[in-house]
Image: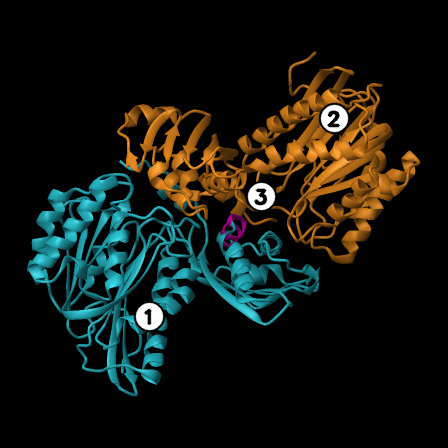
Chain colours: A orange, B cyan
Amino acid sequence: MSELNEQRGVNFPKGFRSAGVYCGIKKPGLLDLALIVSDREASVAGTFTQNRVQAAPVRWSKRVVAGGRARAIIANSGNANCLTGEQGERDAQRMATMVAERLGCPPEQVIVASTGVTGVPLPMNAIEAGIPAAFARLSDGDDRTTADAILTTDTFPKRACLELETPDGIVRIGAIAKGAGMIAPNMATMLAFITSDAHIEPAPLQACLTEVVQQTFNCITVDGDTSTNDMVILLANGASGTTLRGHSLERFQQGLYQVCAYLAKRIVRDGEGATRLFEVRVEGARSPQEARQVARTIAESLLVKTALHGGDPNWGRIIAAAGRSGVPIEPNRMRLTMQEVVVFEHGQPIPFDEPSLAQKLQAEEVLLVLELGQGEASARFWSCDLTAEYVKINSAYRT
Amino acid sequence: MSELNEQRGVNFPKGFRSAGVYCGIKKPGLLDLALIVSDREASVAGTFTQNRVQAAPVRWSKRVVAGGRARAIIANSGNANCLTGEQGERDAQRMATMVAERLGCPPEQVIVASTGVTGVPLPMNAIEAGIPAAFARLSDGDDRTTADAILTTDTFPKRACLELETPDGIVRIGAIAKGAGMIAPNMATMLAFITSDAHIEPAPLQACLTEVVQQTFNCITVDGDTSTNDMVILLANGASGTTLRGHSLERFQQGLYQVCAYLAKRIVRDGEGATRLFEVRVEGARSPQEARQVARTIAESLLVKTALHGGDPNWGRIIAAAGRSGVPIEPNRMRLTMQEVVVFEHGQPIPFDEPSLAQKLQAEEVLLVLELGQGEASARFWSCDLTAEYVKINSAYRT
């Protein structure tokens, strides 16, 4: 049994190979095309951006997931193939077809993903040269280049792997992810590709993924902007020979949660310009929805994000954000702690040692707990501080 | 008849006097206490923050507005008297009482407003010394010090005045406002005090104000954070001898719109760290609510705000923001123009001269028009760019 670690990604489970290559979309030296192949047909599950504007590869890959079976994932970075009209639809299909021809499978079993600038047609010459090159490099060894090839403004690659002992036998989960900006709940400018050698049918696989994504990738925010291209894809190819049911499937879902929570936090930690991560826990809400709405409003507040950047225990901004969340909170019932220091209770400020708390707020991870005193429900959001560097990254002219 | 101008504020209508003094809440040299007095009982109307957390002066002033009549406004800056528990309630009432005693009116006819840091008790010694000092300085002359005394992070005072010819006679409107950060629709960290020498009963006065605020102060955003202290107060004391009804009242409402729209735009233009203002117009929506929701989502998007800071015609971010607004928009029906240049139409990017548009985006005011092609409704929002300076201002430790 292995602890969760980031030494390997999608190649960790049996029966998967991958490659990352440079095909010419980004600047030379940066990898921009990733290919992940299962050596047999795998069950596939996916969750996709809830933005009404959806890129061509999102529309294509939704159809693949609807079919329940997949053999491969082809993903490019540097260009989102979004808002590119009918040409974009043809280009996404062409990517799938080129991969399918080499695998001898239907194009409808190839997931396509793109991330990068919107509104610019894909440079198909580059991609058409890149796909054979990626096949030539396919390996079941180190998958660092695969993880690198899906990055955009990320400053580090994101991998995670885990070996799970279940009542039915041992299975493995591996994953890579990208995301740094345009991160909001309900999917963001993020991709995550997860592989497993467990044997699980598409329907329970999708149920597992949907529940885990709701508690992990859908609980992070960098800037509240939801991208047009996000997807989380999970392939389970059965190469371990272990079929998961009942308790084993629950164990798998716990492992999947570990992997996704780890990657979700890594994405926030790599938030554009971010210097620290903070966790907002809302407890004592009347419903999970209300808890989530309050947590999200605090996590997205620019005033909270900038105060935390400055290490300022400006707790009034947290209470004020809760107050505008749309949830009928009652200040007189609320209790707020920052790094385990109580600062507000029953509608009254609680005196605290400011220099000491300011010091605690300099930590890489900061915990805010807001108890609403209205019920039993809770929620948790991960966010990052807002810095001048975020502005610099996002106001730079694209070209 | 005068054109709208900013030479005078609340002292412009007949029968009003005001003063701004330093009482000791802010650093020496900065004015922090404003007093506005009507020489007779005035009709009063008001709109208040919709944050569930409301400062003590907001709760007090709501009761004053409910009574329909007021004689004065007392407002301090530098301390919001918010999240200050029962002491805060007593302090707000004490401010009203001190003013009322000097005017010989009930405390329930004195509006109280506070703006500044939250969670810290008001320094009542300073305010108790400041109120007599403000009375000693009351003047119907220049009201620049009154406008200065309500500012916090603002970089310039905000005044507006207008003389209106109506079928029933000439009346005047004057106003001062503050606001630079924590600005969101549904009131923000903003105060606006408006005076008029028209005679209008409280009920129609409130109707006028509610409608105008919805189209002006409630259509601006700097950072999407709604404050706990906002209010817009309108006093009409009848000193002109002109009673407004019917068409004259409509004319008054038009004038009030002019004054409020002017001040709302001035607040956005003074947004913390902002270098330019942008107007988002959404047309062709199925309902005004949907138009407003799309416009607001675009106006608040950090990616749109940073792109406009960089003068980057990154129109994909605008379309993507519309896509996540929650409104069922249809990209294939949409048309987007930036500074009157069409960049997207019928789901397809429209080629345009990038250097030329980038140049146009350097203007102090930028216009974005998004046509949804789904109906006849429209909405308009004013916002500003997001800069590294905003982060600097809001991450600085308070002390």
Residue type at mark 1 is Val
The chain under label 2 reads: A
Q: Tell me the number on the disc at residue A212.
A: none
Distance between the alpha carbons at the discs numbered 1 and 3: 37 Å
Name the spot of residue B162 as percent of width and height, x first: 28, 75
Residue drawn 90% across the image and 36% down it: A102
Sequence-first disc among 3 and 2: 2
Res A182 label: 3
What span is colored magenta in the figure? B302-308
Q: Chain of mark 3?
A: A
Q: Is residue A248 magenta?
A: no
Q: Amino acid at mark 3?
A: Met
Using the image as rendered, state which of residue B334 and residue B196 is in the foreground.
B196
Q: Residue at x 78, y 20 (%)?
A: A141
Q: Residue furthest top?
A: A1
Q: Which residue is identified by label 1?
A: B259
Label 1 neighbour load within 10 Å: few <14, some 14-19, many 20+: many
Residue marked by disc 2 = A10
Task: Answer above or below: position of A213 versus B385.
Answer: above
